[in-house]
Amino acid sequence: MDPVALIIFLIIGAIAGWLAGQIMTGGGFGLVGNIIVGIVGAFVAGWLLPGFFPIGGYVGWIIHAAIGAIIVLFIIGLVKRA
């Protein structure tokens, strides 16, 4: 992976994690936490919802990763309550 692709990957993960943090808990987890949640969310969404969101490009990637991150945060919330 070239450096530009890695930077774009991290930026999209950070934005998706921040969006998910705003939607689910009203706050984020800091820059590193948002990147991790966004990246994990992108993998979860790609696994659970392949082809679910038909918009391509950066906006589609961010929305797709944010949906996955929301799912991840929801599961984390369920585990924390138990």
Image (cartoon, rainbow, N blue to C red):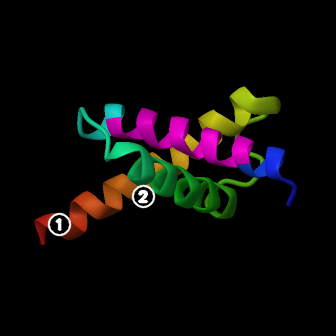
- Most extreme residue toward the left, as rendered? 81
Residue at left offset 49%, top offset 57%:
36
For the residue pair 23 and 53, the one nearer the viewer reads as 23
Which amino acid is tagged 1? Lys
Q: Based on the picture, tell me whether residue 18 belongs to the magenta stretch.
A: yes
Label 1 and label 2: CA atoms lie apart by 12 Å
The tag earlier along the polypeptide, 1 or 2, is 2
Is residue 49 shown left or right of residue 34? right
Disc 1 secondary structure class? helix
Q: Which residue is mark 2?
A: 72
Does the CB distance between marks 1 and 2 fall below 8 Å? no
| Rendered position, 73 above or below 59 | below
Q: Based on the picture, tell me whether residue 29 belongs to the magenta stretch.
A: no
The span shown in magenta is: 7-21
Disc 2 secondary structure class? helix
Q: Quadrant of the C terminus?
A: bottom left
- Most extreme residue toward the right, as rendered? 2
From the top left corner, tell me how far across and down residue 19 is, in percent: 44, 33
Is residue 47 shown left or right of residue 29? right
In the rendered picture of this protein, how many numbered marks are placed on residues?
2
Residue at left offset 46%, top offset 54%:
37
For the residue pair 31 and 49, the one nearer the viewer reads as 31
| Predominant secondary structure, magenta span | helix
From the top left corner, tell me how far across and down residue 56 is, in percent: 82, 32
Residue at left offset 53%, top offset 55%:
41
From the top left corner, tell me how far across and down residue 13 is, in percent: 58, 46
Check disc 2: other Cα within 10 Å, few if <14, some if 14-19, many if 20+.
many
Check disc 1: other Cα within 10 Å, few if <14, some if 14-19, many if 20+.
few
Please tell me in which quadrant of the rendered image residue 40 appears.
bottom right
Q: Residue 80 — which label?
A: 1
Is residue 64 shown left or right of residue 1? left
